[in-house]
Image: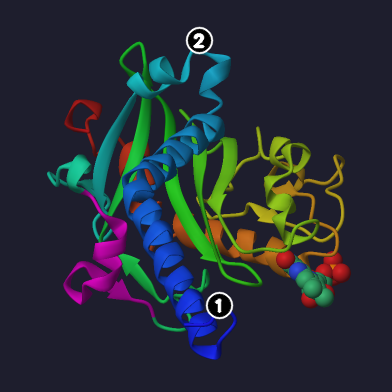
Amino acid sequence: MQKDSILNIILVGVGLCIVCGAVISTVAVSLRDQQEQNVIFDQQSKIIDAARLLEVYPSSQEALASIEEVVVNLNDGQPSSFPPQQYDLDSILRDPSQHTVLNGSEDIAMISVRENLSKVYIEYRNNELKTLILPVRGYGLWGTLYGYLALDSDLNTIVGLEFYKHKETPGLGAEVDNPNWKKLWNGKKVFDENGLVQISVIKGFSNPQSTDYSYEVDGLSGATITSKGVSNLLAFWLGNEGFGPFINNLKNKEIKLSDV
Ligand SMILES: Cc1cc2nc3c(=O)[nH]c(=O)nc-3n(C[C@H](O)[C@H](O)[C@H](O)COP(=O)(O)O)c2cc1C
C-alpha cells in the first residue's frame, strides 16, 4: 500500500485515535481513586480553614483529629445514629425517600431538594463544643456554591465561611474565595436577639456605625447576584428547613453533648 494513499491516511488516523483513546481512558481510570481522594482532602482543608483550626493546632492532622462528624436529622434537629463514614450526599439527593422536595417559597437557596440527614462537624476543646461546622449550599449566578459555615461555641458568632465548589466568574462572583473577603465573616453574628437569621451580604460596604454592622458583610462588587445567593443560602441553612432546629436544640441543651 502506498504511504500517502487515502486508505493509509485513514488507517493511521484511526489507529492513532484508538491508541490515544486507550491511553487517555487508562490514565483517567487509574487516577479516579486519587481524584476522589483529592476531593475529600480539599473538603477537609476547607472545613479546617472555615473553623480557623490551623491557628490552634500545629497540623491539619491534629486539627482533623479534634473534629467529630455527626449525622443530624434536619426534620427534628436531633443527632441520628447513621454512621458518618457511610454518609453520601450525592446518593441521598438522588433518592426521593431520603430527601425533601422544597416548594417555591421554602427554596430560598434554590437547591430544589434538601437532604433529610446532614453531616455536620464539631470541634471539641476541653470536652466542650468549640466550633460547629455546617455544610451549606445554594445557587449563585451560574450554579450551586458548596461550602462550610463555622460557628463559634455561642452558636451565633461566625468563625469563617469557605466554599469548596462553585461556578462563579473569576474576578466577579468567584471573589467568594478572596482571602480579604473571607476575613470579613469572622466575628459577624447570624441571629438577632429574637433568634431570627439576620446575617447577609449587602450591596456596597457595611457601615461600622450601623446597628446592623455585626450582621452585614460587604458585597462583592460587580457580583450582586452571587452576593445575594450567599445571603440566601445562609438564610436557608440557618433557618427552620436547615440547621435552625439543630442549633436551637444545642442552645437549649436539648441535646446532651455526650449524645452528639
Ligand atoms: C461574563 C459575565 C460574568 C458575570 N459573572 C457574574 C458572577 O459570577 N456573579 C455575579 O453576581 N454577577 C456576575 N456578572 C454580572 C451580573 O450579570 C450582574 O450585572 C451583577 O451581578 C450586578 O452586580 P452589581 O450590581 O454589583 O454591578 C457577570 C456578568 C458577565 C457579563
Figure check: 243 above or below 141: above
**Residue at the disc numbered 1:** 3
Q: Which mark is nearer the camera, 2 or 1?
A: 1
Residue, x 30% and y 15% (percent of image)? 127
Tell me which colouring the rendered structure shows.
rainbow
Quadrant in the picture for residue 221: bottom right
Nearest to the observer: residue 12 or residue 89 = 12
Q: Which residues are magenta?
A: 87-102
Is 81 on the left or on the right of 207, as rendered? left
Indicate yes or no whether the magenta region holds residue 98: yes
Residue, x 59% and y 48% (percent of image)? 192
Q: Position of residue 68 (x, y in %)?
A: 29, 29
Badge 2 density bin: few <14, some 14–19, many ≥20, Cα 10 Å: few
Q: Amino acid at mark 2?
A: Pro
Nearest to the observer: residue 245 or residue 50 = 50
Q: Are marks 2 and 1 in contact (CB under 8 Å)?
A: no
- Quadrant placement of the C terminus: top left
- Work out how far the residue at label 2 is from the one at label 1, CA to CA, in angstroms: 65 Å
Figure check: 153 above or below 209: above
Is 184 on the left or on the right of 151, as rendered? right
Q: Is residue 193 visible?
A: no
Q: Amino acid at mark 1?
A: Lys
Q: Secondary structure at mark 1?
A: loop
**Residue at the disc numbered 2:** 58
